[in-house]
């Protein structure tokens, strides 16, 4: 099974679930960078509510994700200080930072390289075995969204596509079916797991960066949560589709 997604910065749990559930996760880095998207920012929970954490990039019209350079203004020490203020008292803060601080401090010039290293380290921390591949190294067709997706599946030898519900609006499954590719829809938001969070008086806040769950649960605890949720959902899918 394969998951194809743009490489997100410190991604939310749906992306992390794919790391533990799929055989291949393809980082779709040869498409246009989306200003205001999730490639260079995400959200954490603080005493006052949610807060954005961002890696500034040099903006160039029409640039691809793999072409986006990290701006000189990026200050990893400031970002890490923000994370410490939000999560420094959690049981697994140090464990989480042992995984995430090194790539943030590595001096990457390009956003795609930073995100790829972060994702590799999250994968390893979760004990996942998926193959992380960047689509920019696959020589895909220059145009045709469905054709490109089918080619990624073919190049990686995967013919079950784990597709986020957000792709329903544009992902035409008919040509994929003709290419021998089965699409399984991942309706993640309605089943987002609830876990203990800091600042409990604010209530549970879903769809945050993985930093939140890792600091509160630890990597082992997060792995268990993700696998349990995935196993339950996949069994329900089998009941519907099988």
Image (tube, rainbow, N blue to C red):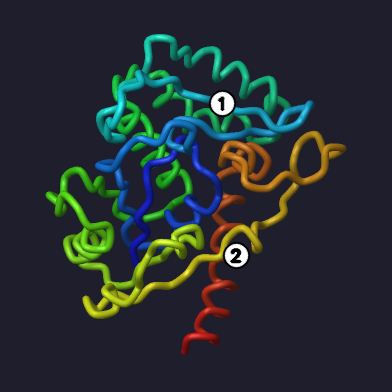
Quadrant of image for the N terminus: bottom left
Residue 181 vertical placement versus 205 (above, below):
below
**Mark 2, residue position:** 229
Disc 1: CA contacts within 10 A as few (<14), some (14-19) or many (>=20): some
Disc 2: CA contacts within 10 A as few (<14), some (14-19) or many (>=20): some
Give x and y (percent) for residue 145. Answer: 27, 57
The furthest residue to the bottom:
242
Give x and y (percent) for residue 231. Answer: 54, 71
Q: Residue at x 34, y 63 (%)?
A: 2
Give x and y (percent) for residue 153. Answer: 24, 64
**Mark 1, residue position:** 53
Give x and y (percent) for residue 144. Answer: 22, 57
Answer left or right for 208 relative to 77: right
Q: Which picture quadrant has residue 103?
A: top left
Q: Residue at x 63, y 37 (%)?
A: 215
Q: Residue at x 56, y 65 (%)?
A: 187
Mark 2 vs 1: CB contact within 8 A = no
Answer left or right for 50 relative to 148: right
């Amino acid at each position: 099974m394969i998951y194809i997604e743009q490489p997100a910065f410190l991604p939310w749990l749906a992306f992390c679930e794919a790391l533990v559930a799929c055989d291949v996760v393809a980082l779709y880095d040869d498409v246009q960078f989306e200003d205001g998207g999730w490639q260079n920012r995400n959200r954490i929970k603080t005493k006052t509510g949610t807060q954005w954490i961002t890696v500034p990039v040099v903006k160039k019209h029409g640039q691809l994700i793999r072409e986006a350079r990290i701006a000189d203004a990026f200050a990893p020490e400031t970002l890490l200080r923000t994370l410490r203020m939000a999560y420094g008292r959690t049981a697994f803060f140090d464990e989480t930072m042992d995984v995430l601080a090194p790539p943030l401090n590595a001096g990457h010039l390009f956003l795609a390289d930073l995100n790829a290293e972060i994702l590799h380290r999250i994968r390893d921390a979760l004990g996942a075995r998926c193959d992380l591949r960047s689509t920019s190294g696959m020589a895909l067709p220059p145009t045709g969204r469905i054709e490109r997706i089918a080619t990624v599946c073919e190049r990686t030898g995967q013919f079950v596509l784990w597709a986020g519900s957000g792709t329903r609006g544009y992902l035409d499954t008919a040509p994929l079916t003709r290419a021998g590719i089965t699409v399984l829809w991942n309706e993640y938001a309605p089943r987002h797991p609830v876990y203990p969070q800091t600042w409990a008086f604010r209530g549970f806040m879903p769809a945050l960066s993985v930093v939140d769950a890792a600091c509160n649960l630890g990597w082992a605890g997060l792995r268990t949560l993700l696998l349990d949720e995935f196993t339950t959902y996949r069994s329900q899918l089998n009941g519907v589709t099988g």
